[in-house]
Amino acid sequence: MAAAGPSSSKDILSEVRTFIAGTSKEKSISHESLARSALHLLQTLPVARHAVLEHLCSLFDEAVKLHILHSDDPTYEEQGESSLDVVIQDVCGVLFNFIKTNPLAWAPIISNWSLELLGHISCKYAHQCGLSSTSSLNELLQMWVTCRPTKALMEVATECFAAMVGSAPDVCVDALLEASVKYSPHFDWVVAHIGSCFPNTIITRVLMCGLKDFCHHGNKRPDMENRGDEKVPKMDSVVDILGHLASKHRQDIRGALMKLFEESMKSDSEVVKVTTVPFLLELASRSDMLLQVLSTDLIKSLNPQLLDKLHANFEPWRRRNAPEYMSLITLVVQLIMKIDFTTLEVLEFLLGIASPVNTNNCPCPEVQEVGAIIINRLIFELQRSVFHKHRDSSFDVPFLSSLVDQSTSILRQLLDSKGPRGDWLLRITAYIGLSSGEDLTSDMMVFILCNATSHVQLCRFVQLQSIVEVKLGDVLPVVVQKVTDKLRSYKISQPNIILANILAIMEWEKSTKSNSERSTLLFCMKKQWEAFLPLLTNDDLHLVLKAVKVINTLEIPTNISSATALRLCSTLLNFFFRSLEVEDTRASSSMFHACRLCLKYLCKETFIQCIALRFLIESLFIKDIAILFGAKQILPVSKDEKEKKNFQSLYESNKKQGLTTTLHRSQSTVFHAGVIGQGLRSSVFGPILPKVHMDRNKQCLMSILRCCSHQTKKIEEVTTPTAESAMEVDESVAMPSHGQSVSGDLCRMIGSLMTEQITPDVLYNNRFWPEEESIQMTVERDLQIYKNMDENPVLWQILDLYAASPLTMCRCSPILKSLTASLMIHFESSREKSARNTPKQLDAAAHLVTYLGKSRLLPAPLRYISELFHTSTSYEVYLLLLSVWRYMKEFPPTEDPDEVNTRACELRHLETIRAIMHNNIDKMGAFYGRFFSPFSSSD
């Protein structure tokens, strides 16, 4: 509707008569005509604004009523509602024009009218809008916003706030508070919507209005406990408004609260200085959200200097109002007990005030005294609450409950604290345990037992026990059970500390015989020596040595069970592998000798020998253990190397693979594939440890294997090695192994175990060597076995260690067969003319022939062909290995010692060797007599 132009007195009088007739029901006038008259009077006759606005209230009320009726019954006639919507749009247009043209005059009037009308409508139709009393604020807001009349009113109110927020914010906020007090909780959706439109202004001005009202009602006696709603009528509204805005504007509320506090510290008004903090505490007592804000941000800002200033502001008021001051302290204690978040920070803050650690930056003595009063009152209330909880199990203290998760940090502070600070922490720790129960209390005592490093700290265990056993008389047996469980389950981080503490407490208990009736660690730990076995796998290797000594001093029973013996054997071998990680040769050798000596005494039964050897060999296939013996791992590639690899072409990488036949639809068709333009993958394999370290580890491993492999017999007394002898391994250990010193069962077990671990499957795991043409059918399997051996070089030495036993080599026949096949394929297809240009494969072939020769499965002179490898071409090495293959195919590996001892070579097995030597007589002539002297008469 356009703004009305200049009107004559007759026109105005006519509109007045029309308006009066329509509102008094003297004549039947349509809503549009009556609204047109009302708006005309509102624009031209200022004295009529109250009557016009009152009429507009009934107009909006009727529109809301029609909307609700239509919502309940969609078939309801919509004509009246549609006509009212047009009228409301015209009314809002006029009101918006007033606000825009003359905000100072019209904005306060329209703001009060719109808020009052919104409150009236919200209350009147609260139970008719289809929502229950438990509906959320978002549901309520959504419902009213979909109502066109209330939405229009909200837009008008928002426009008024926008016009006044810069010039008169107190007026609009005060009106909002008054309406909130009058119409809450049905008015909350209005507050939430307006607050979300002007969060910073609303929050700040709401707090200021609340503080002003608080000062007005509470300046005579700021007694937090006795102040009620009658004295502070707007306090609940302030809390409600801030609560509504907290979901999306929590940070703004935090900032406003802190700004209010900071400004009060700088204020010249004594009333503001003294009243702001009680006002904030009163807000916190009414709202958990505000309590959370104050317990985090406010505490972080209270440094010693600010605390001293705050004390100076309150000191005059405290002297005049001692009872009110104690009431304020009581309120602080009650708020602390209600906190269920950031409780540890609050506790540390209080302790920092009452007993500061840093004396250079601490509050004044008076502030420290106040902090001590608060803590003592807090401890008193906690004690009363804890004992009340034993009478009423439903009673809970949020402060103690939230500290349960922080008990470890509190215990650490307890161990590091002395004087009053330590005593306070001790009492709080005890009450945390008592409020939670026996389980947490025992955990706390176990923690002290595991972490106390001095007698003063260890006294805290005894002191805590004396407090909690008043209610929890059986807590000490639970503590002992948990300690032994931790020792058995590897859950103690520093067992050396707990060992020392247990020993100290038991000695003290021994000296106090008068307390023999009480539960003691000495009694509970008796006959618990097996609980110390888990210490053998502790990260601290020096502790493991100490644990072994402790186990020996605890007088291990002679009737030790087989399970315990096996467990001890397993943990000792774990200790052995971890000792190999030590770089210090002297320390590592000392641990090695201790472990080997213990294994000698343990391996008195064959089944323990089998378990020990199985554990040793299987562990070599674990990545973290294999690297100790030179297992190859992926190493990082430098940028330059990576760029070089990226330029390597796919053709070049495949050309190196030789002239082997590519089988259609087999692995060989894609085995050497790469990414065109990037070349081969940039993975580089290699050992991690230095060579000296790896050689030492291999020597120790071979010694342990010999120790566990020797036949069972009476073990002579062996003294502990001295510091001089600890630098090197015994001569007997360094000597070559002898197959006859290992039992047949162990030889078979070792061979089967090696085959089981190295081969990928059991399909071809038999001792027979097939026709050489079948090699093409097991290429992938053979290469995988060779890769396993190549990436874990210590496996070659293990095979060499037991190579003298034909029983072991017979069981390892699948490994030897696959190694021979993969090497034959390599040398047959190699583009390198001389075999020496592929030293890795050449050494593998030499080892292979040596193993077969030492086991006597390959007789002379075939067992000597490895001496010819370094002077042979790649293809000649292939032919030599082919001769070995054909012999092993004809005479497969066997466990029969008579057959092994009678094996011999015939002339047909040496024809290839003879041809190769004739072809290279200049280089191999010196070896001819070694191979063919017994057959020279046949040449």
Image: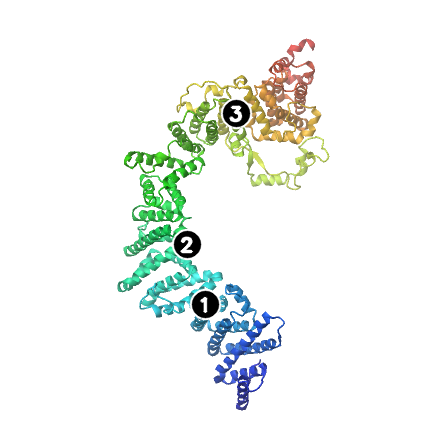
Disc 1: which residue: 202
Q: Are marks 2 and 3 in contact (CB under 8 Å)?
A: no
**Residue 214 x/y as whole percent:** 37, 68
Using the rendered image of the protein, determine whether residue 26 is visible from the camera's viewpoint: yes
Relative placement, left or right, of 880 versus 112 is right
Relative placement, left or right, of 122 versus 765 is left
Q: Amino acid at mark 1?
A: Ile
**Residue 852 x/y as whole percent:** 61, 20
Relative placement, left or right, of 407 versus 916 is left
Answer above or below: position of 733 versus 664: above
Q: Quadrant of the rendered structure where residue 377 is?
A: bottom left
Classify the position of the C terminus by image quarter.
top right
Q: Quadrant of the rendered structure where residue 506 is?
A: top left
**Residue 857 x/y as whole percent:** 62, 18
Disc 2: which residue: 340
Q: Earlier in the sequence, mark 2 or mark 3?
A: 2
Q: Earlier in the sequence, mark 1 or mark 3?
A: 1
**Depth check: 935 or 125 in front?**
125
Answer above or below: position of 674 versus 841: below
Classify the position of the N terminus by image quarter.
bottom right
Furthest-bottom residue in view? Answer: 10
Q: Are marks 1 and 3 in contact (CB under 8 Å)?
A: no
Furthest-left residue in view? Answer: 319
**Residue 624 x/y as whole percent:** 52, 34
Q: Residues within 10 Å of mark 3 (few under 14, many from 20)?
A: some
Q: Residues within 10 Å of mark 2 (few under 14, many from 20)?
A: some
Q: Amino acid at mark 2?
A: Asp
Q: Which mark is residue 610?
A: 3
Furthest-front residue in view? Answer: 391
Q: Are marks 2 and 1 in contact (CB under 8 Å)?
A: no
**Depth check: 899 or 81 in front?**
81
Query: Which element carries disc 2, helix, strand or loop?
Result: loop
